[in-house]
Image: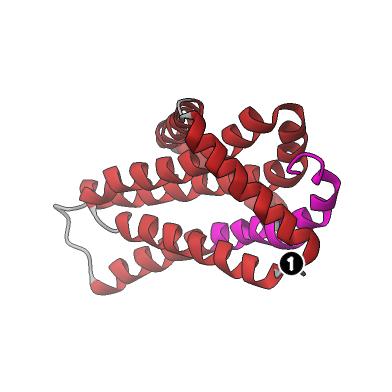
């Protein structure tokens, strides 16, 4: 079973390498935009955002950290993004929206990481590597795959628009497309678990960074 999944994944990448590169470009563009935006913030903006982070960590050391709430909020954000990508993949005109949504997700991730490293230097780098990077890698990989699946489905609709399909055939195409998205979304939730239940365990090690 595992070997079959590996073969299917390899064939999917080979058959859709151009689409993967397009989505990867959207991710890299979002990352570059987030980096540029964080570096171009004014001193007042950086100070205000830094004060917010410091207040958050001070409260964390005093009050219990609601991990379940963080998990649900993070999960809800990903549900919204994945749903919009899935919905865009149902229509030919949804292709630009797929690229835009993936790019925006990578932008926000990049902005947060860039600000923390740029504002807190070595301490921020250590915090990012231990508390942010693990789930970030999962998020970016999953959005790369989900974005590609959505674009692939949209392009199939464009190619087959002149051909008549029975309702059963259409339903089967939609079901397979949706199941693929759901499988990758299930993998995406591991990032939510890490973000909410594992990363906070190490927050106490970085009180010196945000104090």
Q: Quadrant of residue 60?
A: bottom right
Instruction: Identify which residue is drawn at 77% across, 39% down.
Output: 209
Q: Looking at the image, which residue is at 56% across and 37% down? A: 47
Q: Residues within 10 Å of mark 1 (few under 14, many from 20)?
A: some
Residues rendered magenta in the picture: 183-211
Residue 38 magenta: no
Q: Position of residue 112 (x, y in %)?
A: 56, 41
* Image point (74%, 46%), residue name: 131
Left or right of residue 203: residue 187: left
Foreground of the two, 35 or 5 = 35
The residue that disc 1 covers is: 65
Q: Residue at x 58, y 32 (%)?
A: 114
Closer-to-camera residue (82/2): 82
Predominant SS along the magenta part? helix
Image location of residue 88, percent across then percent down: 31, 55
Above or below residue 11? Residue 35 is above
**Is 183 placed left or right of 174 in the picture?**
right
Residue 26 in view, yes or no: yes
């Amino acid at each position: 079973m595992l070997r079959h999944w590996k073969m299917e994944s390899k064939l999917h990448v080979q058959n859709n390498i151009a689409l993967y590169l397009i989505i990867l470009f959207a991710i890299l563009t979002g990352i570059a935009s987030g980096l540029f935006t964080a570096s171009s913030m004014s001193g007042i903006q950086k100070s205000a955002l830094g004060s917010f982070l410091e207040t958050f960590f001070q409260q964390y050391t005093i009050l219990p950290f609601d991990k379940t709430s963080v998990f649900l909020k993070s999960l809800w954000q990903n549900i919204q993004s994945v749903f919009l990508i899935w919905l865009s993949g149902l229509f030919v005109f949804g292709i630009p929206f797929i690229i835009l949504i993936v790019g925006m997700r990578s932008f926000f991730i990049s902005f947060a990481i860039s600000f923390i490293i740029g504002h807190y230097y070595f301490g921020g780098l250590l915090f990012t590597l231990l508390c942010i990077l693990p789930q970030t890698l999962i998020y970016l990989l999953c959005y790369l795959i989900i974005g590609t699946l959505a674009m692939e489905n949209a392009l199939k609709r464009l190619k087959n628009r002149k051909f008549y399909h029975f309702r059963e055939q259409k339903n089967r195409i939609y079901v397979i497309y949706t199941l693929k998205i759901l499988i990758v979304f299930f993998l995406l939730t591991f990032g939510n678990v890490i973000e909410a239940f594992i990363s906070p365990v190490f927050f106490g090690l970085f009180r010196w960074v945000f104090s």
